[in-house]
Image (tube, rainbow, N blue to C red):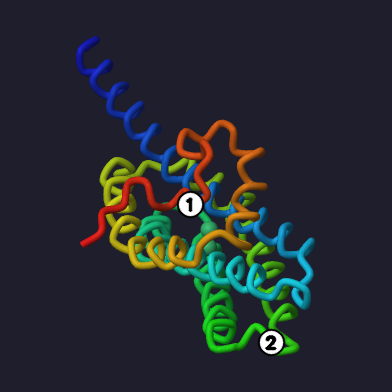
Amino acid sequence: MPTARSASRNTSRAAAAARNQILSELKDDHKRVKKAYREFQKMDSEADPQSCEALVRQVLDELTVHAQLEEELLYPAARGAIADEDLVDEAEVEHESVKTLIEQLREMSPDDEKYAARFTVLCEYVLHHVKEEEGEMFPQLERVRLDWETLSAEMTKRREELMPEEGADLQAEGESGGEMAMAEGQSDDADSPSGAGQTERKTPARKRG
Ligand SMILES: [Fe+2]
Ligand SMILES: [Fe+2]
């Protein structure tokens, strides 16, 4: 009996650790968008359009990966597991709007007079969406039993697959706006093991093919 119980306790401890890792990585993504948006609000897009554009592109790239991870892996796992499945439907619909704004911004020139406005709307919308995820969906996920370890492994693998190109882009883009956003971000991210002095937190574990 004690053996079985401790085995199951170990299993659930490992599952809880995997679940916490998944949710905290997603929350870190959310935080980075918030920080970048705050940075964007301080920028002068006319005086420094290149920094603005670099920051916008960085956010678009990160959001694209994040949304894809949630849609491909997290939301399907949540569906059927959490009590309130409507939350998954709503989140998916919100992602559609987010992706439409992302596509529009990708096709826009930073000189476009609505560029900043569209990015602002995107960020505000994402903040609203994030509030629902962190306030409703994630707390429900914390209470359900899932194969969290497998999901965590799949999400890590998928994140790596989705990242490299964009990481390369960002490195090539260099040192302007994106760096400012991330530099600001570091002050709040002191607990992050990968946040020490690097502008690009996405790349450390990525392999280029
Ligand atoms: Fe989402
Ligand atoms: Fe999210």
Q: Is residue 98 left or right of residue 71?
A: right
Q: Is residue 135 above or below residue 37?
A: above
Q: Is residue 127 above or below residue 187?
A: below
The residue carrying pointer 2 sits among few (fewer than 14), some (14 to 19) or many (20 or more) residues within 10 Å by Cα, namely few
Is residue 94 or residue 63 the one in the foreground? 63
**At x 37% / y 41%, what residue is drawn?**
145
| Mark 2 beta carbon near ligand 1 (under 8 Å) | no
The percent position of residue 137, horizontal first and vertical second, equals 55, 53
Q: Earlier in the sequence, mark 2 or mark 1?
A: 2
Q: SS class of the residue under badge 2? A: loop
Q: Quadrant of residue 16?
A: top left
Q: Is residue 39 left or right of residue 144?
A: right
The residue carrying pointer 1 sits among few (fewer than 14), some (14 to 19) or many (20 or more) residues within 10 Å by Cα, namely some
Which amino acid is tagged 1?
A: Glu
**At x 44% / y 65%, what residue is drawn?**
172
Q: SS class of the residue under badge 1? A: loop
**At x 37% / y 46%, what residue is drawn?**
204
Q: Is residue 198 above or below residue 75?
A: above
Q: Quadrant of residue 53?
A: bottom right
- Indicate the quadrant containing the N terminus: top left, top right, bottom left or bottom right: top left
Which amino acid is tagged 2?
A: Asp
The percent position of residue 131, horizontal first and vertical second, equals 66, 56
The percent position of residue 5, horizontal first and vertical second, equals 27, 17
Residue under pointer 2: 111
Residue under pointer 1: 200
Is residue 103 or residue 57 the one in the foreground? 57
Q: Quadrant of residue 19?
A: top left
Q: Is residue 174 left or right of residue 50?
A: left
The percent position of residue 124, horizontal first and vertical second, equals 71, 68
